[in-house]
Structure formats: structure tokens, C-alpha cells
Image (tube, rainbow, N blue to C red):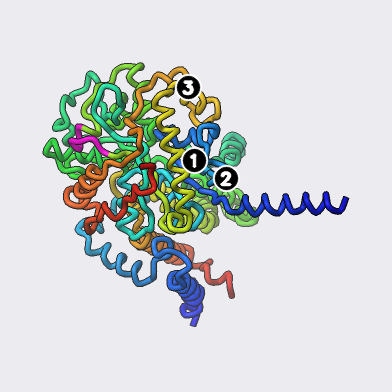
Amino acid sequence: MKSIRALVPIAILLAAWEAAARSGLWSRIVFPSLEAIGREFIGFFARADAWEQIWTSLYRAFGGFTLAAVVGVLLGMIMGRSKLVADLLDPLFSGTYAVPKLALFPIFIFVFGIGSLSKVALIFLECLYPIVIMTYHGAKSVNRVWLWSAQNMGASRWQILRRVVIPSTTPYIFAGFRVAVPVAMIVVVITEMISSADGLGYLVIYSLSSLRTDRMLAVVVIIALIGYLLDKGLVLARNRLIYWEKLDTYYV
Amino acid sequence: MIRTVLALLAGVLVSSAFAQQIPTIRLGRGFAAEEQVWLMSVRRDLTPNQGKKYELKQILFQANPERFQAFLAGELDAGTAPGLAVIFARAQGMDMKLVASVCLEAHGKDYFTTTYMVKDDGPIKSAKDLKGGTIGVVGIKTATDLWARAGLINAGLVPDKDTKVVPMAFPAIGEAVRSGKVSAGTFVEPFYSSEIAKGGLRKLFTAVDAVGYDHELLDLFFGEKFLKAHPDAVRAFLADYVAITKWYLANKEQGKRDLAKAGFVRTPVEIYVKNADWKRTPDARLDVGSLKKLSTFMHEKLQWLEKPVNVDEMVDQSFLPK
């Protein structure tokens, strides 16, 4: 029942799109029919390089995200448990969070080249912020009673970190990951649209340059599906790791 | 008193009705190589029909897809666009026609032609040496992309497979070539002159070398609906356009200074007036043969078109002055 309910808004959106496409009010170049998009979607997987293009974007997104996850969790944990480090780094992260890092992409190209490295570096930077900030707040807000209890029971610093701080912070870490994953997908597509000879973003701009909106939207659907599957995978991993605090319980 | 008021009212009504009869041409323009089009707004004194038979509203666009989207949305009646972009548009069934030429890529010491350059002291001596390298163009499926691919094909290379073609902004290309981030790059004015002055770069081939013939670069298009609805306004517009093209060809420096003063060009004026210009034909007639060749190349060699485009059907020069 729940899964059917979730499909209702998507069905309404698709119906509205098809109605706009069939209305004749707009050119089919602007509003291609669902059938045309579907045809291009199937056609995409008939391409010899379809999986190669998907993989190109995925490894760039994963590369940047993984680096950000490792560095971000580490930094966030240290900031959350050390006032000195937090005082040093918090103003930097809070102050530059809103800076559109994408504007730095031309500089990244000069430093890291036109290939994958500049894209991975920008994805790393964009993903780092939500991960650091969420982890920092998670590590900072560990229940003091738990910490005192652990100390009273003679737990060492390492034991407190492993048994109290990390489990308590993990939901925050995953919240940061869930924000960062779509960011990684968006940034990889945009950077490939700006300067690339491969990847899904390149295919978007390639289709748009030929005024093939149907083909472009088929690629957009593929990007959306990848993003959806990645998020689902992340939620699955989160629920397995943090079995005591499943996301669904929020709605009970 | 009442008579005076009535007369004034009648005058206002008549003049407003007359004003309504003058169609406004909403023209999407770009940011390079369209001097005579821009001058139509800057030097209205050289366009006698403007304000009488048509009004002109120019709207700036950074790229062709956005310009065409605005056209499809009914926000534009006309525009400037590279011939190959209009070939793409016609392939998708867009109802537009090329009515006049703006400029061409042409051989000759008097004209500028888009140039592909490499590092002067680098290992690339000919296009063949681009194998395994990267060539910077300004956008995918733009004219700069077509010339780059043509140059590679001429050298026996397979674009994308042997040499990557990547888009990047014009201002960044010079430094990208010098720093080795790309093996070769596309240079148009004013970046070409500025980079030549800095030194360290060498010409590899030009747009004309790449395709092998002079060809249309930028053209004027109109929507077919507008052409049918306001043929006299289009004729009047094109009469002014041809007149101002002739004036510009005879008074380039003055024209460029007027444009710089009006803010149409950001390049320092003393550099801008000295830059070589693209070829412009005084009668604004299109080189239809070159468009046909480009269309065939796009279809057969680059596989950019799924089927051939009938170039004769996409050109209508009957609105130009005889």
C-alpha cells in the first residue's frame, strides 16, 4: 500500500507532462512525449558505450564522495570531541558553506587538469561540507549521561569513542552521507556538462546541443534512477548498521 | 476648447494605432562577430526604416540552445545563429529560415578565420601529432567542435577515440594550451590577438583549412510565421541591414568605436579596432553551397544528423534587397 502511495505523485507528474506534450501548446522539442523519452531511454542501453558512460560518471562521483566521507567523518569527529579544533575549523566551514564551490571549477581545471581529477576534487569539496558539519554536530551532541556512565564504569578513551561516541554519531554521519550523495551526482553531471568528453553530463549537453530534448531527458531519467538507487542503498546500509534507530520509526 | 481636446485625442489615437501597425522584431543576438547587427541598435540613424516600418529589440544570449528555446517559447521572432546550429534546428523540424549572412570563415589576409593553436615549443608539429591528446573547443556540436573534428579527420585521426574533444570557455583556452592541460585549443578574436601578443603559441590549422573551403559562420534567421505575417517589415529590416553592413565595411574603425562606446564590446577599444575581422559580404547574400557541404559533412562524416537536411528549404533570400 505504501509503495503504491509513493507512486501517485510520480504518476500525476508523468500525466501532467504527457498532457503538456500532447496539448500542442508547446513544441515537441521543448516537451517531448513520454513515448519519445521512453524510446530514447531504451535506445541508450543499446549504445555500445552505455555502461562505460554510466561508470565514468559513477567512479567520479564515488571517488569524490569516498574521499569526502573519509576526511569528513574524521574531521567532524575531531571537531566534535575537541573544542580547540572546533574553534579553529568551525568558522571556516560555517563561513564558507554557502560559497558556490562550482565557481571554483575553472581553477580546479587549471590545477588538476581537464580529466577526472578536477571533477573528483570538486565533488570532494562539495561533499565534504555536509559530512563534516553533520558529523561534528553528531559528535558534539553525544548524551553526557552515556559518557559519564562509561567513565564511571572505567571505560578507556578508546572504549568510550568506540562504544559510545561512534554509535551515537553514526545516524548523523549517515544523514550527512544522504545529503552528500545527491550532491556528488549533481556536481559530476554539471562538471561533465561544462568540460568533459565522456560521462552522463557530457551526454546531456551533447543531446541538448542537437536539440534532442527527448534524448537529453532519457539521460536525466537515468541520472535520477542512479541517484534513487544510491540513496536506497544508503538507507539500507544505514538501517543495517544502526538497527536500533531505523529511519521508518520516525513515522510511527 | 472641446474641439482642441477632441483633436488631441484623435491625434493620440491615430498615432497609437499607427504605432501598433509597426511590428517589433525581437532578435536574439550573441556576443561575437555580429557587428553590423549590433550597429542597427547603436546607430539607428543609419537604419532609415527603423521606427517607421519595424521596431527592433535585441536580446543577448550566451549560447545557441538557449536562443532556440526562447524562439520555441515564442519570445523571439528572429536571431543570429551559426549556419550549422540552424541545420540542427531544421533537422528537429523548427520553423525557421536563414534570410541573410552575417559573416563567413574565409581564406585571405584581410580576414580573420578561427585558428587552432598549440604550444610553440611543444611536440605537436602537425594535426597528426594530436593522437592521444586533447583539443579544446568552446562547446559540443558547435562550429568550433566541427572544425576541430574536421581537422582531426583530415589528419587520419578518429575524434573522441584518438583525440578527445573537450569544451571550455574561450578565455581559459590560452592558458590551458600553455600549461599543457590541452594539446591544442580554439582561438577567435579578441582572444587570438591577445594570445599571439603574449607569445608561446603556434598555429596548427584554421577553420577553413579544416573543412577545405570558405563557408558561412554566422547568419540571420527568422521564424517562418513572422516572415508570413510581416513580409514588408522583414524587407525593410533587411534593407537597413544591408545598408549598415556596407557602412560598416567602409567605416570599420568608427563602427567598432561606436559599439565599444555603447557597451556592446568589452575588449579594450584600441585592441578591438585593430583586430582582424571575419569576412562579410556587402549584399549579405548567403553562400548556400557551403551550407550544403557543411550539412553533408555533419551527416556523413560526423554522424551528427540522423538524416540529411534540405538546405534549399531552410534558406529564403527573397527578402533581401534586389
Q: Label 3 lies in what chain?
A: B
Instruction: Give the residue at the far front of this rendering.
Output: B3
- Can marks 2 and 1 be said to lie on one chain? yes
The label nearer to you, 3 versus 1, is 3
User: Which label belongs to residue B254?
Assistant: 3
Badge 2: chain ID: A
Mark pair 3, 1: CA separation:
42 Å
Q: Is residue A182 above or below residue B278?
A: below
Closer to the camera in the image, A227 or B193: B193
Which residue is denoted by mark 2 in the rendering? A80
Give the percent coordinates (x, y) of residue B79. 43, 46
Amino acid carrying mark 1 in the image:
Lys
Q: First in sequence: mark 2 or mark 1?
A: 2
Q: Secondary structure at mark 3?
A: helix
Circles 3, 1 touching at the beta carbon (< 8 Å): no
Element on which disc 2 rests: helix
In the picture provided, is B200 more to the left or to the right than B25?
left
Marks 2 and 3: CB-CB under 8 Å?
no
Q: In the rendered view of the protein, which quadrant contains the C terminus of chain A?
A: bottom right
Are marks 3 and 1 in one subunit?
Answer: no
Residue range (magenta): B209-215
Residues at marks 2 and 3, CA–CA distance in whole angstroms? 66 Å
Give the letter of the chain under mark 1.
A
Mark 3 surroundings: few (<14), some (14-19) or many (≥20) residues within 10 A: few
Q: What residue is rendered at 47% in x and 26% in y? A: B255
Residue identifier under label 1:
A101
Q: Nearer the viewer, residue B132 or A22?
A: A22
